[in-house]
Amino acid sequence: MIKGRGKAEVMMKKLSAFLSVFVIIGLAFNLNKSFCEGISSSQARGKRCLVKRRPPHHRKVSRPLADSGDCTLSRTVIKNEYWPMQTYIIPIVFHIIHKTDGTRNIPDQRIHRQVQVLNQDFAATMGSLGEKGYNTKIQFELVQITRTANDQWHNDQNEVQYKHALGWDQQRYLNVYVNTASGYLGYSYLPQEDSGDVYDGVVMNYEAVGGRDSGNAPFDQGRTLVHEIGHYLGLLHTFEGYGCYEGYEAGDLIADTHSENAEHYGCTQTYTCGTPDDIHNYMNYTDDSCMYEFTAEQANRLVCCLVNYRPLLFSIYPNGAAIIGLNRTVLNFTAVLSGTTTGPQDLWVSTSGTLDWSVGIEVSWLSCSPTSGANDGVISVSVNPTGLGPGTYTGTITITSANAVNSPPKVTVNLMVKDASRDRPPFGDFATPVHGSTVSSSIPVSGWVLDDVEVTSVKIYSGSTYIGKSVLVEGARPDVENAYPGYPKNHMAGWGYMMLTNLLTNGGNGVYTLTVKAKDSAGNQVILGSKTIFINNAEAVKPFGTIDTPGQGGIVSGSNFVNWGWVLTPQPNVIPTDGSTINVWVDGIKLGHPIYNIYRADIASRFPGYANSNGAVGYFYLDTTAYTNGVHTIQWTATDNAGNTDGIGSRYFTIRNNGESSRMAVLSEKISQIPPDISTPVGIKKGYETDSICRDVYPDTSGTINIKIKELERIEIHLTPNTQQVTLKNTPSHLYSGCLVMDNASQPLPIGSTFDPARGVFSWSPGPGFVGDYWLVFIDKGRNRLKKINIRILPGYTKN
C-alpha cells in the first residue's frame, strides 16, 4: 500500500479518473476480523494496503539522476543497465511504537524473522517459499530496532511528528514504523514523490510484522512488508488502473505481468482479462501463502528506481570481494540473580581475503577477547550481569574492517536476567539407540538437551553403573536449534557418545537398560530417558575396539600428535600385525595406517585368547597443523583376514594451534543468485571403499538430491556431471564451494566433513549425535549452477 500525505488517502492509480473512486471505496481485502483490532468484518476487506499520497500542492517530485523517463509514474523503460548484476544492500531500521502500558511491543525475534523473509523473497532463495520468483539481488541489513511508548503515535496519529522524532536519515536508511498503521496492514510512499523527506518509509501494522507462519493467517508469511517495500522501491499493483492494460505506459507499467482488471483475494486462479491473473505476484492482494514472485521486469524497475531515486540508500556487494564471515549472528545468554550465568561462547571469524579487523561493543555488561585480529580467528564472548535487574537486555558486537565490503557484520547478543525462582532444569531427548534394538560392538548413544542457562554434563549409565560423559556437538541438531531459537548455546544442543559394549558386564551379552542424565550449571539434574537394548557380542564377527587419544572432546595441537587406539577381532580371525588393514580417518578422509601390534596389559587381560590379544594397540602420528582450528572427527576402520570390516570408535576433538585458522568457510557468493541444477546427478559412495564406483543419484521433481545413510556411516559425494563411471581419478577439475543451509541461512559445512573444492568431492563421517536432516548446497562456479542435497541420517539400529 502506498500512502500519501494530508487528508487525501487514496490508492495510487495510473489514471486520475480512478483516484476519486478509491478515496470513497478504498480497497477490498478478505481479512480476519481479529487481525486489525477495531475493524469490523465489513470493513476488513478494505484494510490490506493503502496508497496514501499528499494533495498535489504538497507533493515534492524527486528528480532522478538518469533520464527522467526510465521509471516514472507514467512509464517504464527496460534497460540493460538495470538488470540486477550485483547485490544491493539496503540498511533497514525498525521503529516499534507500542502502547504506554507495554502491550503490542513485539519482540526482536519477529523483526529478525521478518528481515529474513525480505531477504528470501527479494532473492528468491532456494528452499524458501519464494524460490520460484526472480532474484532482484536486493537484500536488507537490519541496523537497529528502536522502541517508543506513545499511545497517540501507536494509533498512527501525528505521523509527521513521530517520523520527525524517530526517523533515521531517510536518504540513507529504510525506516519501518510499526504501530496500528491506521488499521491497515501497511502503507508506503513512492520514491518518485517522497524520496528522502520526513514522510518517506513504510508504516506497518504491528500484527502484520513477522516471519513464516506468524499466526495471523492468511497474512502470516511476512509478505505484507515485501509488498510495501515493492511500493517503496517504485512498483505499482499488478491490477493498477483496473483495466486490461498492457505494456510499459499503462496499468502497472510492466509488460511481463499479465493484464488484470481487479485486485485478487484468496488463492483461486482468475482470468479477469482472459489471461491468468498474477495471483502469485507480491504486488497483488492475494493471501501470503499464494505469493512467491517478482517478475524479471519488476526487478529491472526496482533497480532503476533504486539507483535513480534512492542513490544514497544502498551499498553494493560485488562478487569476489573481501568479506568477513561469522559463524553466528545471534548469541543468547541467561543470568540467574544470585545464581549461575551462561559461560563464554566462541564467535568464529572467517575472511575471504587478507583483512585486519577490530571488535566493537556498545554495552558495559558484554565483553570480547581478543578485541582485534587478522584474517581468521576466534573471539570469546562473555557477559557480566552485575548490577542488572530482571529483564531482557540486548547488545551488539560489530566486527569492523576497512577493506571488507560487508563491514561491519554484526552479532546480536541477548541476555536474560531472571530471579532464581524462574530457573528451570534441563530438558531434551534420548534418541539412539532405539528402544528394543539389538546391537553389538561400538554403538552411538545420542540425543539433544537444552537448559535456560547452560548444560554442564550429559552422562550415560548402564543400570546404576556410570559408563561415560557425552560431548555437546556444535551443529549436530539444526532441527532443535530452529525449534528453540532463544535458548543459550542452542547450536550445541546435540550430544553424542560412542559406547563400546564389549566393556560392559558379561562382555556385553544380554539385556541392558541405558539411562541418560543431564545436569545444568545450577546443579539441577534430570533423566532424559531410559532405553532397554539387547546386546549380542557372543555372535559378533566384526572387529571392535576404541580410540584412546585424543580424548572425547579433547584439545590437541602440534605436528606430531600421537593418536592411540586398539583393535581386536572375534576368534578365530586375526588382524594383520603390520596394521595394513587398519585405516585412520579424519573428517571422512583416509590418512594412512597406524603402527600396530603393541602390547598393553589391560587389553590382554580383559580379552584373553584373541589372536591379537598381546598386540592389540596401535598409534598414528597426526599433523594437526594441516587442519583448521576447530572441532573435527577421528575414526579408525579395521578389516580382519576374513574380510569383516567395521568402524573403531568415532571421536570429536578440537584442534588449537597458534595462528589464525577457522573451520568456517566464507562463501563470497549469494547462493540465492545461482540457478539450481535440476537434472544432473551426483555420484555417491557409502562406507570406506574409496576406490569403488559411484552410484548416480538424480534430483527429484523439486530439484533436490536425497540421500539416506545410517548413524556413523561415511558418505562421499562427487559433484561431477559424469554420469557413467566416477572415481577419484576422473573427476573433472572445477572450482566448487559449499555450505550447510539451516533455516534458509548458510552455515559452515558440518563437523566431521571435508570438501575438496578443486575436484568437487565432499566426504563426511558424521559422529555420534548427528541424526535427522542436513541440507547442503554446493556451487559449481565453472557452470554457475548449484546443487541442493538433503542427507537424512537414520538411527544405526532399529527395533527387533
Image: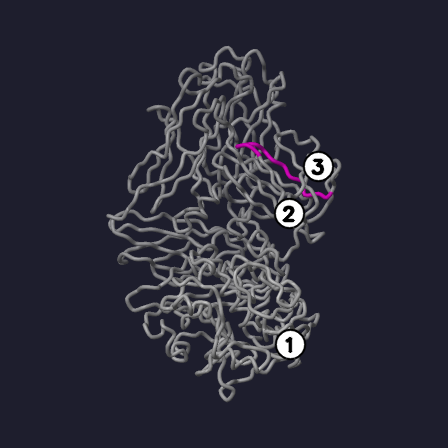
- 267 sits to left or right of 426: right
Q: Secondary structure at mark 3?
A: loop
Residue 176 visible? The answer is no
User: Which dot, 2 or 1, sits closer to the camera?
Assistant: 1
Badge 2 amino acid: Gly
Task: Indicate yes or no whether the magenta region holds residue 715.
Answer: yes
Badge 3 amino acid: Leu
Mark 1 — residue? 250
Residue 723 occupies which quadrant of the picture? top right
Q: How is the image coloured?
A: one colour
Q: Residues within 10 Å of mark 2 (few under 14, many from 20)?
A: some
User: Which dot, 1 or 3, sits closer to the camera?
Assistant: 1
Q: Secondary structure at mark 1?
A: loop
Q: Secondary structure at mark 2?
A: loop
Mark 2 — residue? 703
Mark 3 — residue? 728
User: Which of pointers 2 and 1 lies earlier in the amino acid sequence?
Assistant: 1
Residue 430 visible? The answer is yes
The answer for how far apart the CA atoms under marks 1 and 3 are is 58 Å
Q: Position of residue 326 (x, y in %)?
A: 51, 54
User: Which of pointers 2 and 3 lies earlier in the amino acid sequence?
Assistant: 2
